[in-house]
Amino acid sequence: MELRQLDYFIQICKEGSFTKAAEVLMVSQPTLSQQIRVLEGEYCTPLFYRVGRGIQITEAGQILFDKGLSVKQLIEESRKEIYELKNIQRGELTIGVLPGDLFYLMPHFAQFREQYPDISLKFVETVDFSEQVLQNKIDIGITTGSEQNKHTDSIHLTKEEQVLIIAENHPWAENATIPFRELQHLDTVLFFQSTMCREFIDSYVMKSGITLNSTIVAVSSSSILSMVNHGYGVALLSLPLVESYNHPKIKIIRLTDPTPTREIKLSYHKNKFRKHTVRTFIERLRWQPSS
């Protein structure tokens, strides 16, 4: 079978008509019919039923159509990968990040852009990394999630310490550190950046055998800092995120016994790792040694 014949066959399936397909392909209908007869002879089975003036794909034809689309996709991916191989400095990447994380991650992305100015970076805020990667809506996800499946893979990037932030007039403001268990004595609103962050802290709460008595609210990181500063509550955020804002009236208290630490990973589709732009990004973004 020639690729040209597969193109003819797929177009007929899409148009549902030899006549319409011939017009789109700009070939004569007899030529189209003759090439399909060659295919049917090769597979020793009809690919279409002729129903009046129309056609209906056979079961064998449906198999060839589905597999043919996969072949065409692989050919297109091969073209892109070969192009990237020849033009390693060019390309486009769509990167998924947790809501609020883009602000403090931007300096690292900026360093990458300085080194590879012709690789365009597009950012998408999401918490559903696995699904976004599988649907090819993002090339890489920077995530804390642990979900894995046979189509995706992840690489350890770094670890982030979670800290308590309070207003400068809070009763605990003189403390540099407190035991994690002390959180059970909070009687104010406790803000989180996202439900994912709350689930992460909940796992530490369960392991410590304590109960949080605070009212728990998930809001954006920028809103959290303002609300904490004005005395509406306290919050648990990642240390790099808090330091990136450098808020003069926010006090940072580090937690001990245990210190809540989340792993940050690069998540990607296994097939995408063959892309030179993806591999280059992953290699350059490992800004800290594995912990």
Image (cartoon, grey):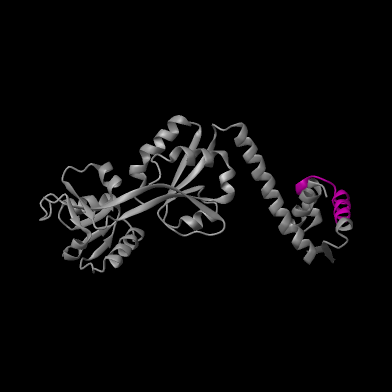
Q: Residue at x 44, y 33 (%)?
A: 113
Q: Residue at x 30, y 53 (%)?
A: 220
**197 drawn magenta:** no
Between 97 and 173, the one nearer to me in the picture: 173
In this image, 220 relative to 268: left or right? left
**25 drawn magenta:** yes
Q: Quadrant of residue 40?
A: bottom right
In this image, 85 relative to 173: left or right? right
In this image, 154 relative to 170: left or right? right
Between 279 and 217, the one nearer to me in the picture: 279
Q: Residue at x 80, y 46 (%)?
A: 4
The magenta segment:
24-39
Q: Quadrant of residue 78?
A: top right
Q: Main secondary structure of the magenta part?
A: helix
Between 35 and 233, the one nearer to me in the picture: 233
Q: Quadrant of residue 86?
A: top right
Q: How many marks?
A: 0
Q: Position of residue 138 (x, y in %)?
A: 50, 49
Between 69 and 249, the one nearer to me in the picture: 249
Q: Position of residue 176 (x, y in %)?
A: 16, 49
Q: Position of residue 165 (x, y in %)?
A: 21, 52
| Position of 242 relative to 120 (above/below) | below
Q: Position of residue 129 (x, y in %)?
A: 46, 55
In this image, 201 relative to 131: left or right? left
Residue 249 visible in this rendered orientation of the protein = yes
Q: Residue at x 75, y 62 (%)?
A: 62
Residue 98 visible in this rendered orientation of the protein = no
